[in-house]
Image (cartoon, helix red, strand yellow):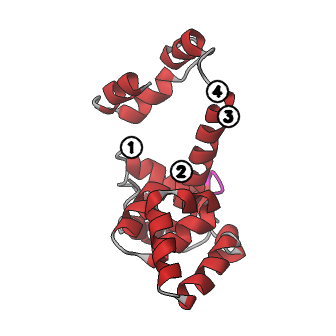
Amino acid sequence: MQEPITRAAGTTEPQKTLLDMCKDGEEFDKLYEQNKDKIDKKHLIWLVMVMQRNILSIMLFHQSLGALVEQVRNGSNEALFKAVSIDRSILSCPTFSDRLSYAELTNDKDFFIHLRKALKGPSKKHMEAIGDLRYAIVLLKEVGFDRFTDEELITFFVNTRLYPNNVSAIKNLRKHIQDSKKYTTI
């Protein structure tokens, strides 16, 4: 599926193009039908899991797992612990296993204390926070929609119950949107 995905990425609206390609009877359906004997169903399940973990990462940390992996490559233990809290299997990836091996070789006890905590998963504090709002803001930003009028803020976030309807809702929503600009999701 690399060719159609690459083609979609080159369009003016890649997300819309990809979503259109996923509709019943469209390109991805046809590719699946032509190749279903060669496709292992566990790979499809893995793809769904990857998408779910990326959504969770964006909701909790304003960043995709890919962005966290890039930070780990650049030496960030904090990003490593965030990524591990989202998906423990990420430790088997070379970037993570190299850091794990280094910590073992240097007897980095502090690293393993933080790793043990990360292996328990994301904190409940994050899970109860405004994850859906964060995800919606990131999605809108990714499709190039990050400038909102007050009416749009109310329509997109308050009327959909992603954010409570209160006196300071617009001010607080603008702060969340501004904060999201500090993070990369790639």
Q: Residues within 10 Å of mark 2 (few under 14, many from 20)?
A: some
The residue at 34%/32% (across/down) is: 13
The amino acid type of the residue labelled 3 equals: Lys
Q: Quadrant of the N terminus?
A: top left
The amino acid type of the residue labelled 2 equals: Phe
The residue at 47%/68% (across/down) is: 176
Q: Which mark is residue 143?
A: 1
Label 3: which residue?
42
Q: Residues within 10 Å of mark 1 (few under 14, many from 20)?
A: few
| Residue 59: quadrant of the picture | bottom right
Marks 3 and 4, Cα distance to the nearest angstrom?
5 Å
Marks 2 and 1, Cα distance to the nearest angstrom?
15 Å
Q: Comparing marks 2 and 1, which lies closer to the viewer?
A: 1
In contact (CB < 8 Å): disc 2 and disc 4: no
In contact (CB < 8 Å): disc 3 and disc 4: yes
Please name whichever residue, 30 or 175, is drawn nearer the observer in this view of the structure. Answer: 30
In magenta, the rendered stretch is: 159-163
Q: Which mark is residue 133?
A: none
How far across and down, in percent of the image, does residue 101 sit?
A: 50, 73
Label 2: which residue?
156
- Of labels 2 and 4, earlier in sequence is 4
Q: Which mark is residue 40?
A: 4
How far across and down, in percent of the image, does residue 151 sit?
A: 47, 54
* Residue 33 in the figure: left or right of residue 97: right
Q: Comparing marks 3 and 1, which lies closer to the viewer?
A: 3
